[in-house]
Amino acid sequence: MDSSEWIRRFKIALIEENDTALAGLIGKMPPFDDIDEARQAASLIDRARQEITAKRERLKTAMAEIKKTRKFLTSSGSDEGRFDITS
């Protein structure tokens, strides 16, 4: 795969938020003969890093909310933590 094809595929993986494809492409990064393509690749990799970091923070927040909800549900019921929706 040449460098322009790598950049094209990386852009697609970034738009699709496909972390697996991004990691695979980073592992198979070709040498860049053109300085502009090298800069573009560096910029795209930085953008992917930012997106993954933001996704990690959103996941961390969601997990904390689930943990709080779970704790509330288990502490507020007298039926050993079960949530009865039939009554």
Image (cartoon, rainbow, N blue to C red):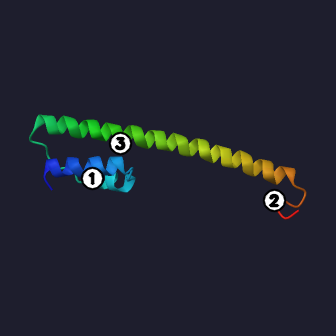
Query: What residue is rendered at 16% in x and 39% in y?
Result: 37
Give the CA separation, mark 3 to mark 2. Answer: 40 Å
Name the spot of residue 10 as percent of width and height, x first.
Answer: 27, 49
Q: Is residue 27 above or below residue 79?
A: above
Query: Which element carries disc 2, helix, strand or loop?
Result: loop
Residue found at the far bottom of this picture = 86
Q: Which residue is mark 1?
A: 25
Q: Which amino acid does the dot numbered 1 rest on?
A: Leu
Whether 36 is drawn above or below 30: the answer is above
Q: Quadrant of the N terminus?
A: bottom left
Q: Report which residue position mark 3 lands on.
A: 48
The quadrant of the picture occupied by the C terminus is bottom right
Q: Position of residue 49 (x, y in %)?
A: 37, 40
Q: Residue at x 34, y 47 (%)?
A: 14
Res. 26 visible in picture: no
Q: Position of residue 3 (x, y in %)?
A: 15, 48
Q: Amino acid at mark 3?
A: Ala
Precedes in sequence: disc 3 or disc 2: 3
Q: Which mark is residue 83?
A: 2
Disc 1 and disc 3: Cα gap in Å? 11 Å
Could you tell me if the residues under marks 1 and 3 are in contact, i.e. CB atoms within 8 Å?
A: no
Secondary structure found at label 1 = helix
